[in-house]
Image (spheres, rainbow, N blue to C red):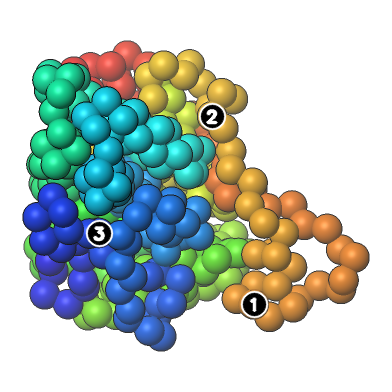
Amino acid sequence: MPSSSVPTCLRWVGDAAGHLELLDQTLLPTRLEWIECHDVDAVVEAIKSLRVRGAPAIGIAGAYGLAVAAGEAARSGLEADAARAHVLARAEELACARPTAVNLRWAVERAVATLEPLAADAPAAGLGATLLAEARAIHEEDRRLCAAIGRHGAAILPAGNILTHCNTGALATGGDGTALAVVTTAWEQGRRFEVFADETRPLFQGARLTAWELVHRGIPVTVLVDAAAGHLLKTGRIAACIVGADRITANGDTANKIGTYALAVLAAAHGVPFFVAAPSSTFDLALASGDEIPIEERAAAEVLAPLGVPAAPEGAKAFNPAFDVTPARLIRAIITERGVIEPVTQEGIATVLQK
Ligand code: MRU
């Protein structure tokens, strides 16, 4: 449990023959319900429909999903070869469930790599035990990374109110969060401020999830429609903007929830520092710039009928990219578990990530 009042968003129940439980984030903030994933189809569905979401959290879910895959193989009585082939096929389905957050493929590939040293005749149960151990390690590591990001970020966060976008807290990670951990760490250190949370259309992660986490932690939060951010920044009431990331390329370009780029442009226009907080697993150094990041396009219904309520006439089309890319030049610093990258340059990124 990352804090006394915000539940963890995912947990494994039982031994290697057990199952994954996910807090169904599509129901928050009104209902707190867990879903049981006994097969990979359920894990993939949960990732695609954002029952579990946030770059680090979907990586952890993907890694646990491999243990679920080994459980499927064991229950079907597959021989060693077939069990391994089954797990590898399921791994690819999990890694492809969402395209933008690199943490998903990173975690799945890391878990798959643990199978390589195992004997070719290792039974499904053996694969499952190894995969579960690795998923647990990734989960526990993420909890520690979040704490380190919180500490590094709190040390450089300017005094005053904070504006954030989407959800980057306990609901998005295996610990207390990335950008939101910076905020909550600063608060726990005794700093006092107000958090402004963009509602984050079309799926309202800011209003439904970030505000929920902050209310539970007793941190004052004010929700605004995304379009109010420019006006708010103009009033001078915001000392810093801080967001998470789904993929950061070698030059520091950062993919994050749609609306992040607009917020960064507005922050620059008003001289407000714009920070990104993310673990090293969110960096994709194989990509030279943000132009190469695949951007997930989601269903039109999310825009045309937000929260299930029709808001546009039948016949209208929707433009619904789930993420955008903020160029490195608009980012004051990137806060990682290994330290702060400031200024954001290719050399600075390489230096901090090597630590
Ligand atoms: O579509 P979502 O809700 O998965 O998008 C999440 C974000 O964009 C977060 O800001 C990002 O994953 C960082 S989470 C620590």
Quadrant (top left, top right, bottom left, bottom right) of the N terminus = bottom left
Vertical placement of 113 versus 196: above or below? above
Amino acid under label 1? Gly
| Residue 286 spot, x, y in % from top left | 41, 16
Q: Which disc, if any, is residue 20? A: 3
- Examine the image and state in which quarter residue 304 appears: bottom right
| Residue 240 spot, x, y in % from top left | 37, 53
Does the beta carbon at disc 3 come under 8 Å from ligand 1? Answer: no
Badge 1: how crowded within 10 Å, few (<14), some, or many (20+)? few
| Sooner in the amino-acid sequence: mark 2 or mark 3 | 3
The residue located at (39%, 69%) in the rendering is 25
Vertical placement of 216 versus 234: above or below? below
Q: Between residue 292 and residue 329, name the one nearer to us.
A: 292
Alpha carbons under labels 3 and 1: distance apart: 28 Å
Residue with the most extreme bottom position:
30
The residue located at (83%, 58%) in the rendering is 317
Alpha carbons under labels 2 and 1: distance apart: 30 Å
The residue located at (15%, 34%) in the rendering is 123
Vertical placement of 137 versus 300: above or below? above
Q: Nearer the viewer, mark 2 or mark 1?
A: 1
Q: Nearer the viewer, mark 3 or mark 1?
A: 3
Q: Between residue 92 and residue 329, name the one nearer to us.
A: 92
Q: Which disc, if any, is residue 293? A: 2
- Examine the image and state in which quarter residue 245 appears: top left
Q: Which disc, if any, is residue 308? A: 1
Badge 3: how crowded within 10 Å, few (<14), some, or many (20+)? many
Amino acid under label 3? Leu
| Sooner in the amino-acid sequence: mark 3 or mark 1 | 3
| Residue 237 spot, x, y in % from top left | 43, 66
Q: Which disc, if any, is residue 335? A: none
Residue with the most extreme right position:
315
- Examine the image and state in which quarter residue 350 appears: top left
